């Protein structure tokens, strides 16, 4: 009897233990409504990553952006580099423009036309050559000041040849093809410009016409190198300068009229033409030749 009761008690004990412990397989089943969990991407070392695409800089409609995302501010271009000039004295300059314009049409042009009818063109060209040869010190000294020694040597050679074999400068044998020494039209205003001095602002002087503070100083400097400045009495030098202007105008009648007639605002056209002309002469190495200067406003 005792042998039978022991297995019976052992069976009851295991039955009670299984009633308190659920099936292990059932405990591994997921719940009916599992909570949302973040997906974690586990990348194995054995799987290669896709190549990284190059970054494309973002272009703004109004600003340039470099590869680092920084805004590039464009370098400001000066007005003079663009061929422009400030004009704070425009009311005065316009008044002087109208004064010079009336002086040209009422005095200078009629006198030049009458002079041209009396004096043959060949003689007037000879007078122009003479005054150009007389202005040799201006060109020679300013070539030296600009360290343009080749130009200075050419000017010295031109002056020697034209003075000796050109009948005092009335002829220009130095420009012949065999010699081919071109004139270097350098002045003190160009010298100051070659040193980096800007034009500043626009000035329209009575009688002298378009200019700037730099070129006004240049006019004074060139006057000291002009031989007829030292003629006595003073009006002898002024008369010589006036005759040079009349002779020069007689050879260029129609140039000013063409420029004025083609412009909507002649004052602005002449101002801009002068600024471009002076800027081109300052930036050009070795000056310019008379052929390049023809038809342009004179300083």
Image (cartoon, grey):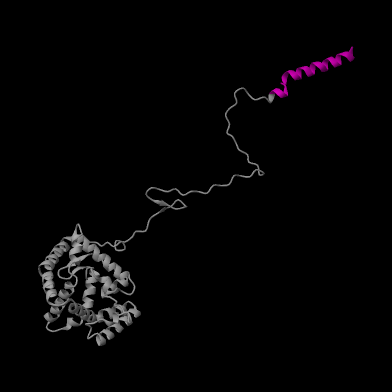
State yes or no: residue 59 in magenta.
Answer: no
Is residue 243 or residue 49 the one in the foreground? 243
Quarter occupied by the C terminus: bottom left
In this orientation, does residue 247 appear? yes
Q: Note whether 262 is above or below 191 in the view shown.
A: above
Q: Residue furthest left?
A: 106
Provide the major secondary structure of the magenta segment: helix
The quarter of the displayed image where residue 132 is located: bottom left
The quarter of the displayed image where residue 148 is located: bottom left
What residue is rendered at 28% in x and 72% in y?
Answer: 190
What residue is rendered at 80% in x and 15% in y?
Answer: 12
Q: Note whether 15 is above or below 186 in the view shown.
A: above
Q: Note whether 208 is above or below 3 in the view shown.
A: below
Is residue 123 or residue 147 the one in the foreground? 123
Q: Position of residue 172 (x, y in %)?
A: 26, 81
Q: Position of residue 29 (x, y in %)?
A: 67, 24
- Answer left or right for 283 relative to 168: right
Q: Residue furthest top?
A: 1
- Answer left or right for 2 relative to 69: right
Is residue 182 or residue 297 the one in the foreground? 182
Q: Position of residue 32 (x, y in %)?
A: 61, 22
Q: Magenta region: which residues?
A: 1-26
The quarter of the displayed image where residue 142 is located: bottom left
Quarter occupied by the N terminus: top right
């Amino acid at each position: 009897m005792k042998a039978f009761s022991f297995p019976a008690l052992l069976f009851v004990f295991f039955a009670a233990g299984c009633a308190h412990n659920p099936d292990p397989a059932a405990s591994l089943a997921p719940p009916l409504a599992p909570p949302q969990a973040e997906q974690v991407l586990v990348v194995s070392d054995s799987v290669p990553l896709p190549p990284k695409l190059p970054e494309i800089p973002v272009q703004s409609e109004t600003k340039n952006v470099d590869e680092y995302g920084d805004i590039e501010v464009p370098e400001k271009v000066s007005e003079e580099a663009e061929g422009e000039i400030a004009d704070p004295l425009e009311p005065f300059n316009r008044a002087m423009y109208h004064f010079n314009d009336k002086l040209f049409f009422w005095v200078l042009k009629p006198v030049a036309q009458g002079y041209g009818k009396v004096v043959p063109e060949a003689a007037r060209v000879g007078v122009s050559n003479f005054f150009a040869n007389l202005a040799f010190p201006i060109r020679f000294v300013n070539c030296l000041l600009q360290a343009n020694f080749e130009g200075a040597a050419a000017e010295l050679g031109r002056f020697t040849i034209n003075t000796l074999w050109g009948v005092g400068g009335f002829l220009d044998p130095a420009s012949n093809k065999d010699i081919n020494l071109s004139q270097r039209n350098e002045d003190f205003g160009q010298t100051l410009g070659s040193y980096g001095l800007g034009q500043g602002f626009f000035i329209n002087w009575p009688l002298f016409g378009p200019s700037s503070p730099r070129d006004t100083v240049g006019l004074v400097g060139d006057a000291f190198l002009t031989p007829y400045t030292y003629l006595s009495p003073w009006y002898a030098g002024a008369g010589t300068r006036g005759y040079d202007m009349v002779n020069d105008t007689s050879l260029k009648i129609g140039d000013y009229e063409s420029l004025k007639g083609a412009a909507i605002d002649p004052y602005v056209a002449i101002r801009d033409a002068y600024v471009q002309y002076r800027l081109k002469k300052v930036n050009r190495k070795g000056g310019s030749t008379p052929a390049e200067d023809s038809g342009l406003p004179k300083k």
